Amino acid sequence: MLKFLVKRILWLIPVVLGVSVLIFTIMCFTPGDPARNALGADASQESIDEFNEKHGLNESYLVRLGSFLKSTFVEFDLGTSYINGSSVSEQITSRLGYTLKITYIGILISIVLGIPAGIIAATNQNTWKDSLSMVVSLFCASMPSFWFALLLVMFFALRLGWLPTVGVKSWTGYILPCVSIGIGGAAGIARQTRSSMLEVIRQDYVTTAKAKGQSHSRIIWGHCLRNALIPVLTVIGSQMAVLVGSSLVCETIFSIPGIGSYLVTGVNQRDYPVVLGCVVILSLIFSLTMLCVDLMYAVVDPRFRNILK
Amino acid sequence: MSEKDVLLSIEDLVVEYSSDSEIVHAVNDVSLQISKGQTLGLVGETGAGKTTIAKAIMQILPDPPARITGGKVIMDGENLLDLKEDKMQKIRGNRISMIFQDPMTALNPTIVVGKQIMEAISLHEKVSSREACRKAEEMLEKVGIPKERYSDYPHQFSGGMKQRVIIAIALACNPELLLADEPTTALDVTIQAQVLDMMNELKQEFGTSVLMITHDLGIVAETCDCVAVIYAGEIVEYGTAAEIFDNPQHPYTTGLFGSLPNMAKEGGRLKPIDGMMPDPTELPEGCKFAPRCRFATEKCRQGRPELRSAGGSHVVRCMRTS
Amino acid sequence: MQSVKTNQSMVKKSQFGMVMKRLAKNKMAIVGLVIVIILLMIAVLANVIIPYDYGYQDTSALLQAPCAKHLLGTDNLGRDILSRLIYGTRLSMKMGILSVLLAAALGTFLGSIAGYYGGIVDDIIMRFLDIYQSIPGLVMCVALAAVLGHGLNNSILAVGITTMSGYARMIRGSIMQVKGMEYIEAAVAINAGDRRIILKHIMPNAISPLIVQMTMGIGGAILMASTLSYIGLGAQAPMPEWGSMLAGGRSYMRDYGFIVIFPGLMIMICVLAFNLLGDGLRDALDPRLKD
C-alpha cells in the first residue's frame, strides 16, 4: 500500500514536467509575436528588442525551455507577466484558495447529488422516479455550465435577490458558482451510479445475501453500493477534469479572483507566462485529485489493494 | 411416509418466466415432499427447472421476469408463498438456506468472508456482535478453514475454499432444510469429494434435511435417500435411491443411466439421449419427453401422462407404466 | 476467396440491419436522431429560412421582447434573435462536426500506431497521452485557442486537438483487442503488409465504437466551442455563435432574460440530441452494455 502510494506520488513528477514541457512547446512554436501583443501594434522597434531581451525571447527554444523548467521547478518561480510585470507565482498563490474551494465544493455537490439520485433511479427501475431522475440528469449533462450559471444569477440573484451576483465576500457567494459547476458532474455521476447499481443488483452475491434473509434496503446499502461505486470513481475523476475547466468560465462570470479568471485574462491578453503558470497549476490540481481517486479505489475495492502489493 | 415426518412439501408448483413476447414455462405442477433428516436428490439436465424450484422455495427468484403462478410450499402447516416478505426474511438463512452453484461469484468481493458468515448469524440469532463473530469463526473452523482467515477477502481464496465459506454461511444458523444447488459442479473433481464428505458430516451433525440439486448421478448415489428426476419442469420419476437405481422405469431416467460411463462393464458404448430438451416457450402437448423417446406412440403425443405407481413409493410419469 | 468475401459482406449487411432495427426500437435515440436531422437541415438551409439577416440591425426595435415580428425578440443592437440562432446552428454544427472529424483523424492516427506496433512505440505514445490528459480539456483548449488566435477556424483546431486523446485511446484499445484474434495472425502468416492489415482487417472492427464516440463527441465539441466563444476566444462578433450571443446578452439579462435563455437552450438541445443519438447507437451496436 505504502509502496503504491510512493510510486503514485512519484508519477506526479513526470506528469507535471511533461505538462510544462508540452504547454511551453506549444506556446513557443505557434505563430504570434508576444512583444507586439504586450506593447501594442505601434511600439517602436527599440522597445520591442528591449522586451525580447528582458524576457529572453531571443534565445533558442532549448535554452528557453531549460531556463523555464529551472525557474519553475528549482526556484518555484513562474516568471513575470508580460503585461504588467507582476509575479505570476504570487498571483497564483493568492488565488489558489478560491479555485480549490470552488472546484472541491463543486465536486462534492456532484457526488452528494449524483450518487443518491443514481441509487434512487436504480432501485426504482422503470418507475416515474427512475425516469424523472434520468431525464433531469440527461438535461443537466447537456447544459453548458456557464449558461446554467447565468440562469441561476438571473433567478436567485437578480429576480429574488437572495444571493449575491458576483464576488465571494461571504459564504453565500460560493453557492451559485459551486452549484453551477457541480450540476453537470452530478448528472454524469448519477447516470453511472444507476447503471453500475443495476449491474450489481443482478450479481450472484446479492442473491446470496437475500438467501441469508437480509432485507432489501440493507442489501442495497450494505452489499451493492460499495461494489457499484468502483466504476463511479472513474467517472468522478473524469468529471473533475470537466469541473476544473468549468471553473474558468464560472470564475469569470462571478468575478471570483481565482486561477481560472486569471487564466482567462492572461489568454485574452496573450500573456504567455500567466497562461503557462495557470495551466501547470490547474493540471497539478487535477492530477492530485486523480491521485485521491486512485487511493479511493484501494479503499473501496480490496482486489485493487491486492494488485498493488 | 407419515405426515409428521414431512418437513416441507411442495404442491403443484408453477413458475413462469415472462419476457416481452413469450412465456417460458420453467416449472409445471411440481409436487415434492422432503422428510426430516432426509436427503432428496433432484436430478435433471441443465434448464430442467431444478434451480428454479429451489429459488421458488426461498422466494428469491428474480421478479421480474420470474413469477410463481401457482401451487403451495408448505412448512409447518404454513404456505410460505403466502407469507409477507418480512416473515420470509426470518425463514431465509435461518430455517431454510441455500448453497449456490458458482462459488466464484456467490461471495461479495468487497466484504471479508468472516463478516459474510457473521451477517447470517446476527440476522437470525439474538447475540452480541462479538458472540456472532466468535460463532462465525467457529463455522469457518467447522468447514475446514483456519479462523485466522476471518478477515480475508474472497479473492484470496480458491474455488473450493469459497464453496466452504458458502456452506458455512448456509449452515451458520443450523437450518432445518438446506437447498444445495449443484454445490460441486464448479469445483475440481478432487475438491468435489472433499466438499461432499464435509456436507455429509455436517448434515449428520446438525440433522439437516437436504435438497440436493445435481445432474451428477454419482453424487445422487452417494448422498441421497430419495430421488426425483425432473424433465422440462416436470417430475418424471420419483422413488427411493434404491428404487431408482435398481429399477429405473422412465425412458428418460434409463437414458440418463445409459449416458454414464461404467467402469465395471468393459467396452460398452455410452448412449447419449438423442435430441434436445423441448423449447420451454412451446412445450409439446402430450408427454414432454415423447419427441426424444424411443417408445413414444401416438397416445404419448396426445395426452399428458399422470404419475403412476410402480410399487412402493416409486412413481413414474409414463404411459408404459401400468 | 470470392465466395468468402461475399459471405463476409452479407454478414456485415445483416449486422447493419440488426443495428438499425435495435436503434429504431429505442425511442430516446429516435428523438435524438430526429432533432439532429432537423438541426442539420436548419444548418444547411439557414440562408433560406432566416427571417432577417443575422447582422441586420432594426434600430427601431432594440431589446424587443418576443412578438409577432421578432418571434424570439431582438438583442441590444436590434438584431433578430431567431435569425441569429438559426444562423448560429450552422456555425455550431460546422464547429462540432469538423472538430470531431479532426480529433478522430488525429486520434486514429496516433492510436493505430500505438496499438499496432505496440512495445516501446506504444509506451511512448501512451505516456504522452497520460500527460496530455492530465491537462483538463477546457484548460488545454483555452491555452491552445490563446496561441492559435481568435476565430471560428482556430477554435475548431483547438477543440479538435484537445479532444484527440480520447479517440487515440479508444482506437488503440480496439486494435489491441482485435490483434490477438486468430484471423489477424492468419493475415500476418500470409505475409500481408502492415498497412493492409491495419486498413483491411483492423479498422473495420474499430469503426463502430469510433462512430459512437464521434456522435457523442459532437455534443461535447459544440459545448466546448461555445464556451470558447463565451470567453471571447472563439467566433468573433458579429458572428452569431451561441456562446458569444450569451456573452453579449449578459449585461441585459436582468431585464431581458430572453436574450440569454434562448441561445443556451439551443446549445442544450443540440448537445442533448447528439448525446441521445450516441447513447442509442452504443446500445444498438453492443446490446450487452445495455441495462
Image (cartoon, coloured by chain):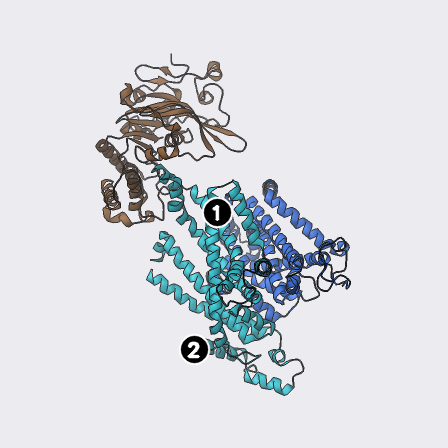
Q: Quadrant of the N terminus of chain A?
A: bottom left
Q: Quadrant of residue C48?
A: bottom right
In this rendering, position of residue B109 left or right of residue C67: left
* Chain coloured brown: B
Name the quarter where the C terminus of chain A is drawn. bottom left
Residue A80 seen from this side: yes
Element assignment for label 1: helix
Residue B52 falls in which quadrant of the image? Answer: top left
Which percent across, then down, holds residue C90? 69, 57
Q: Residue at x 47, y 15 (%)?
A: B303
Question: Left of C122 or right of it: where is B6?
Answer: left
Is residue A152 found left or right of A196 in the rendered image? right
Q: Are marks 1 and 2 on the same chain?
A: yes
Residue sitting at 63 percent across and 52 percent down? Answer: C269
> Any idea which chain is the blue one in this picture?
C
Please give the residue where the numbered disc 1 appears in the rendered image. A194
Residue that carries the numbered disc 2 in the rendered image: A74
Count residues near mark 1 (Cα–Cα under 10 Å), then give few for <14, some for 14-19, many for 20+: many
Q: Can residue C203 be seen?
A: no
**Chain A pictured colour:** cyan
Q: Nearer the viewer, residue C275 or A127?
A: A127
Q: Give the image location of residue A222, x and y in percent.
A: 37, 46
Query: With respect to residue C14, does A143 lie above or below?
Result: below
- For label 2, the SS is loop
Relative to residue C67, is residue C76 depicted above or below?
below
Q: Nearer the viewer, residue C218 or A191?
A: A191
Q: Residue at x 39, y 65 (%)?
A: A9
Most distant residue in the top direction: B322
Outermost left residue:
B205
The chain ID associated with circle 2 is: A
Q: Earlier in the sequence, mark 1 or mark 2?
A: 2
| Amino acid on which disc 2 is placed | Val
